Image (cartoon, rainbow, N blue to C red):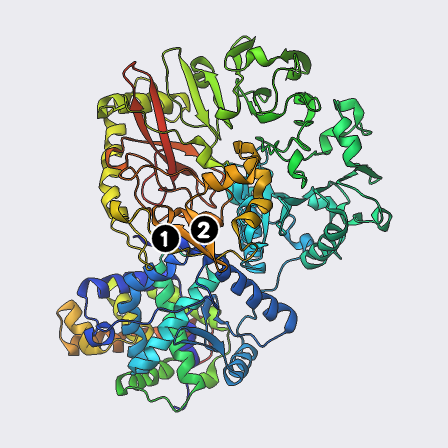
Amino acid sequence: MSGIPEIFRALGNMSDDIYEEALNDLEKGAKHNEELYADNFTTVDITPKNKAPLFIKAACAAAAIIAVFVAVPVIISHFGNIPTTSGTSVSSGTVSSTEENSSTASSDNSSGQEPEKLPPTLDEVVGMSGEDALSALSAFRIGDICGIWKLDGAKQLSGGCGFWWLCGAKAVTVGIDNTSENFSDNKITYVSITNAAAGKNSDALFIDNLSKAADGSLTFGQLKDQIDELDKEHRITAILLTENGAEMLDDELHGKSVRTLEIHFKQNGRLILNILPKEKYCDLNAFDKNDFPSDDAEKTVYYGRYSPDPQHADTEIFCGSRFIIGHGGHSFICETNGDDKMILCGEKNKISVKNVGYIDIDGDGEYEVIISTGKDDPDSGDNLQIYLYKNSERTLYRLSSSDVGRSVLLTDGLSIYVSDSSLQRSHKLTADMFRSETKIEDIYVGIFKKEETLQTAKSDDRFLSAYYVYPNETDRMLSDDEVALLLQNAAAGCDRINAGEDLTKTKELFKKFKELEDEFIKITYPEGIGDVSENELDDWVIAREQPTLFKSMEELYELEKSIYTCYDMDSYEKFAKKFDFLKFENGTLYIKKKMCRYISAFESTSFAPMIPYGNYKWYPDTEVIYFPGITDMKAIFVMQTSRYLSTKYYIGIINIVSDDNGNCRIERSELDFSQTFAYS
Amino acid sequence: MDDGQIVRLYTERSENAIDETYKKYRSLCMTVANNILDSREDSEECVNDAVLAVWNTIPPKRPDSLKAYICKVVRNIAAAKLRYNKRLKRSDEFTVSLSELEEVLPDHRVNRSDSDIAAVIETFLRKQRPLTRKIFVQKYCLCYTQKEIAELYSISIGKVNSILSRVRKKLREHLIKEGIEI
């Protein structure tokens, strides 16, 4: 016998469970040859130069591009469904593929193995089940498509779009129709590509109703190229396509100084193109359904994203659904589908809306809205209009600055809490509202205050850090029983458990969590990131991820000042003071150790304020992962998530504190512990 | 860290996934690789390749068992290395294993795709007693020696040989019955 028998190779295609049971016994027996792994092992280095995850993505993207477009022989071959890297040599910390190996791998393909998966066209994606589409898209360009998130059809773009903007990457978000509780059964309804070019906040491409839009000739790559090209010239903030979307991007746009481009495709296929230059946009006081030239407006989806202009960028608004909101700083549109259409209007230079959300109070598909106001001058009178749609009936409410900080009763069971900028992205609902919700998918934890108000936060917001509240000196930790009761009530409000159910189950979950805690804390990071001793807090270390788009704090500020203006950092001086834990020396970014874990947040969009030493730990999670008072962590909570693929429940961790007056607050973070235990 | 958490790190493209995989499965993978390659250096390279392959394939894949997944990858890469580099030596045990397998289904008689054959064999194995099934996989998929398997289950080597002999014979009959030309 000269080679490896075919049957041996075929055995590699058997199911994992067949292998697993055999491996389990072997593991129990632990008969491995100790000599083989006694020494320090060489960790495979899959990053080309820097070891930052961003660059891993870039490397993978580059590899994918090469593989797809340059037609380098496939280096990753398959034994059926099982991948091998027979042509890839990974040793001494580098990744290389030799010609010899490549050729052998190619010959392997010719002997029946599957070729490397090619990127899908838009047409191919449409109609796939959610998981299949995500899988296909994931395979397209790991790194270039650096995030794919499940979107509930009625929910929003999650934070991922902005997650990568500093690396100049792009993100793809896939929307599903959310017609089935089973994720796999949902169909793709749109794909959003976020073009996170340097110096721009967010340029998004929305493609809606792809099932009717694809013409069979538009691939992802072609689409991307066109967007890139247009983007260079016109600073297109958003392109929205609905049906027949493949007709996009006509030459007639050239030469026009458009700040915003909307392309609407009516159901009958007639193109309606709206170009909204800055001037018009800023003068826009109100949109109504009638403003749009289509009777089938339910098929039209409006968008809202950042304006690239920092001065108008402070209405970054993500709202809970496909109606999306906000643009330009002073005007915004919020719309839902069909008879539940809801339009909100703000006026130029008077008030900017920081937050718009909706709650389906009755679970019957009616949309109602809550808002909070922004930081702009709220003293200019009645300047915020809220249209509340219910049963096709529109009611107009006007709010003024005097409403800031208080709840306003809109209608029975619906109050709106108008917050100022210090409560960005938080909504306050009455306890009754919270309890009456039956289809909450995005809300999540609340804390009962004396006045029976719940403070809620959205789970899939990219500015999670904005939710953090900090312990006061008078705070005390609640007892387990108190926390359990609070959690019980909150969970009951989300229909997660029955009100009045005894606390046993909840307490058991606490116990599980506490047992988990040690396990997580034991994690040590390969580059020495971990708990930082008090004496080391102010030490400077080289940041793990070295930014490529800026080499000074000034540059960083210029790149992101539109964000920071939301946080009252409207000057470089304020910015520098806030981020005094960062510095550049000779183009290298240094960071104080106390923030070294969070600086991986260069992938993220915001910096969270520092938690006092002793109140944080590092956690092996790529999301926001620290929280104060972890040693006294008291509660977990559960919510449905749209953030992680194939994850039904999101386990949140909250730390509940109480002050001397008996008011309770939460400090919260979230981890996806769904793999560990579920609360359903 | 359990498999699900590690897989999630992969899906999130966290480099910690690599470290956690090494921590948890390096020794197992090294053993499987060495069973085939009989070389520490080649095995190390094989395991590194496997981890890279896992990195490149998760996502989109989300294996339920990372252990099984990576061990299969290791096995397949190791076999591929042998196939492509005929200068690599093989252990006597492994050579015998391959011979026994080829007796079950000679190469020149293979008239189905790998996945078809795998499905038929898998169906067959699922009908076998668990111990038989596990020993078959350990021997012919993961390339452990009869001695190691015997020690694992505290049975004699003769017993292992007997089980393997019987299951090979049954498998051959099953392949014929399923229309795979022998």
The residue nearer to you, when weighing A9 against A84, is A84
Above or below — where is A533 with respect to A177? below
| Residue B149 rendering spot, x and y as whole percentages | 20, 72
Q: Which of A560 and A216 is in front in this view?
A: A560
Residue A288 numbered mark, or none = none
Who comes first in sequence, dot 1 or dot 2?
Answer: 1
Q: x%, y% of residue A667? A: 36, 30
Look at label 2 and name its amino acid.
Answer: Lys
Q: In which quarter of the image is the N terminus of chain A?
A: bottom left
Q: Is mark 1 on a helix, strand or loop?
A: strand
Q: In which quarter of the image is residue B31?
A: bottom left
Instruction: Please give the name of the residue rendered at 31% of the width and 57% of the height, measured from the top-left corner.
Output: A528
The answer to whether the residue labelled 1 contacts the one labelled 2, judged by CB atoms less than 8 Å apart, is: yes
Q: What quarter of the picture does the C terminus of chain A occupy? A: top left
**What numbered label is drawn on residue A583?**
2
Cα separation, mark 1 vs mark 2, equals: 9 Å
- Residue A633 position within the rendered picture, expressed as x and y whole percent measured from the top left: 27, 33
Q: Viewed as shown, does residue A213 lie left or right of A186?
A: right
Q: Which residue is drawn at 49% across and 46% down?
A: A604
Query: Which chain's residue wears label 1?
Result: A
Look at mark 1 in the image and give the residue it sits on: A540
Residue B117 appears left or right of A301: left
Front in this rendered view, residue A664 or A30: A664
For the question of whether residue A284 can be seen, the reply is yes
Q: Residue A37 location in percent, x, y?
A: 24, 72
Image quadrant where residue A448 sits: top left
